[in-house]
Image (cartoon, rainbow, N blue to C red):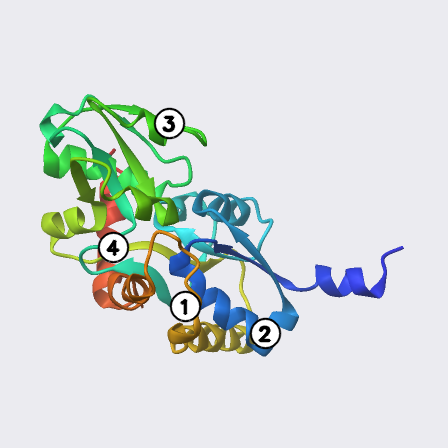
């Protein structure tokens, strides 16, 4: 027989949030608002956020854009996202040779949106046709010679000065389309009460207006760089231009 505590936990709204630094404002807002008493907050890598929402193991996820077509029914429940308007400074293609000499590209096992963004850029913008290889946890050491690699998130901070050629994928998208890019957005796989959605967005906003209270957890970033990343590189508002970019990205995604 379930205890009252277990019943209470099972009735909470389950939320999967990306565990990267760029999500810290969202996490701070959720953990420091009353909503935390009504949710089960789980911290995951992007690919797991998507899988949990698709498999209905959670009710809400900070979902990579590329996962949207895989969700049977979904609702975008927030005007906040993880986006960039030019450089994002944490999603890269690393290489020791120029694009035209790349033979193989290793795909980041933590990503789906960024891997597919790289494929879109390769086909429609860079005009290259490399071999694509999926990876598991240890692959960064294999980025050498004519083999390049996609690396996203906090791991990328420490690698920017280790390769001869560094391509910021959001910046490359901007060069290609003159649009911002959205990496992840808040999505639910079921209808939620308006009151809850309002409280949820209020909590996210609380985190965003308190970025200056966040602690720098990256040994690769100075405090100044940490703050600049969250306040300048990442753009959290899901505005009309970003919605337009999502539609265009999904059109390209259907073609590859």
**Of the image marks 2 and 3, the number of the one nearer the N terminus:** 2
Identify the residue position indicated by label 3 in the image: 134
Identify the residue position indicated by label 2 in the image: 35
How far apart, in angstroms, are the residues tagged by discs 4 and 2? 30 Å
Q: Quadrant of residue 164?
A: top left
Q: Closest to the observer: 71 or 10?
A: 10
Mark 4: few/some/many CA within 10 Å (<14, 14-19, 20+): many
Q: Quadrant of residue 210?
A: bottom left
For discs 4 and 2, the disc positioned in front in the rendered view: 4
For discs 1 and 3, the disc positioned in front in the rendered view: 3
How far apart, in angstroms, are the residues tagged by discs 2 and 1? 15 Å
How far apart, in angstroms, are the residues tagged by discs 1 and 3? 32 Å
Residue 90 placement (x, y as % from top left):
29, 50
Q: Is residue 29 visible?
A: yes
How far apart, in angstroms, are the residues tagged by discs 2 and 3? 38 Å
Secondary structure beneath disc 3?
A: loop
Q: Is residue 237 visible?
A: no
Identify the residue position indicated by label 1 in the image: 78
Secondary structure beneath disc 1?
A: strand
**Of the image marks 1 and 4, the number of the one nearer the N terminus:** 1
**Of the image marks 4 and 2, the number of the one nearer the N terminus:** 2
Q: Closest to the observer: 220 or 212?
A: 220
Q: Do the CB atoms of the residues marked 1 and 4 lie less than 8 Å apart?
A: no
**Of the image marks 1 and 3, the number of the one nearer the N terminus:** 1
**Residue drawn at (32%, 65%), measured in percent from left and top?**
230
Identify the residue position indicated by label 4 in the image: 88
């Amino acid at each position: 027989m379930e205890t009252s505590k277990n019943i209470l936990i099972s009735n909470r709204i389950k939320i999967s949030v990306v565990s990267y630094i760029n999500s810290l404002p969202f996490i701070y807002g959720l953990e420091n608002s009353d909503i935390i008493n009504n949710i089960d907050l789980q911290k995951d890598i992007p690919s797991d956020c998507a899988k949990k929402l698709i498999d209905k193991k959670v009710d809400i996820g900070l979902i990579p854009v590329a996962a949207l077509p895989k969700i049977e029914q979904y609702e975008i429940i927030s005007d906040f996202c993880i986006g960039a308007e030019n450089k994002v400074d944490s999603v890269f293609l690393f290489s020791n040779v120029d694009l035209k000499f790349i033979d193989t590209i290793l795909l980041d096992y933590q990503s789906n949106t960024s891997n597919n963004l790289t494929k879109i850029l390769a086909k429609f913008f860079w005009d290259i046709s490399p071999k694509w290889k999926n990876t598991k946890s240890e692959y960064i050491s294999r980025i050498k010679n004519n083999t390049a690699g996609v690396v996203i998130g906090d791991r990328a901070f420490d690698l920017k000065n280790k390769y001869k050629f560094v391509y910021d994928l959001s910046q490359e998208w901007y060069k290609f389309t003159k649009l911002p890019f959205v990496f992840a957005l808040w999505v639910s796989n079921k209808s939620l009460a308006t009151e809850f959605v309002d409280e949820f967005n209020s909590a996210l906003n609380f985190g965003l207006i308190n970025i200056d209270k966040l602690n720098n957890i990256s040994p690769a970033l100075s405090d100044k760089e940490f703050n600049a990343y969250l306040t300048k590189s990442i753009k959290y508002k899901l505005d009309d231009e970003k919605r337009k970019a999502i539609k265009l990205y999904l059109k390209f995604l259907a073609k590859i």
